[in-house]
Image: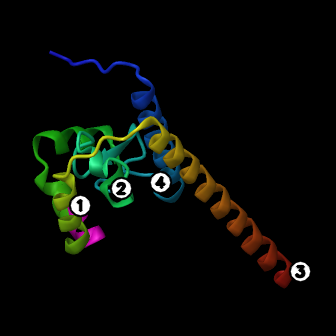
Amino acid sequence: MIKHRRNTEKNLLTDRILAEIKRQKLEKTPYCVQCGSRNNLQLGHVFSRVCKSIIFEWDNLHIQCESCNNYHEVNPEPFNNWAKRNIGIEKFNYLEAKSKQIKKWTVPELKEKLKRLRCVDERNKRNVETIQSRYARQKG
């Protein structure tokens, strides 16, 4: 039986935050981190999104194709091994420990999280533009 989530403000904000993180991650990694596919890309969680304490942790979220993400649901070991190699065992252990903590996000916290994500993204874009214009002036 499929359990449907209600469209509460919290759920909608959570989905918007995860969509923003996915968009930012896709800019840097436009392929599945496990198999390299560029089709049906999703935001995969090393530790499930039901672990609200780490649902938005950058190192817990990675781009995966639908196939690898679905496989992770039934056999987490390959993706967990990938994560240990790529984020490091210390960060993996930190995420694992933090995933066991209880966190209930409030609507104001979620709104602030989304706002901060967008601000960081805008700052990064401006920095890239500044670097590109400096480089163009140096070459020209």
Quarter of the image with the N terminus in it: top left
Q: Secondary structure at mark 3?
A: loop
Earlier in the chain: of badge 1 and badge 4, it is 4
Q: Which one is closest to the eye, mark 2 or mark 4?
A: 2
Residue type at mark 3 is: Gly
Q: Is residue 110 left or right of residue 97?
A: right
Q: Position of residue 19 (x, y in %)?
A: 47, 40
Residue type at mark 1 is: Leu
Where does label 3 land, which residue?
140
Q: Is residue 16 left or right of residue 52?
A: right
Earlier in the chain: of badge 2 and badge 4, it is 4
Q: Residues in magenta?
A: 82-88
Residue 57: image tag: 2
Q: Which one is closest to the eye, mark 1 or mark 4?
A: 1
Q: Position of residue 129 (x, y in %)?
A: 74, 66
Q: Name the foreground residue: 35 vs 128.
A: 128
Where does label 1 land, which residue?
95
Q: Secondary structure at mark 2?
A: loop
Earlier in the chain: of badge 3 and badge 1, it is 1
Mark 1 and mark 4: Cα distance apart in space = 19 Å
Q: Name the foreground residue: 120 vs 75.
A: 120
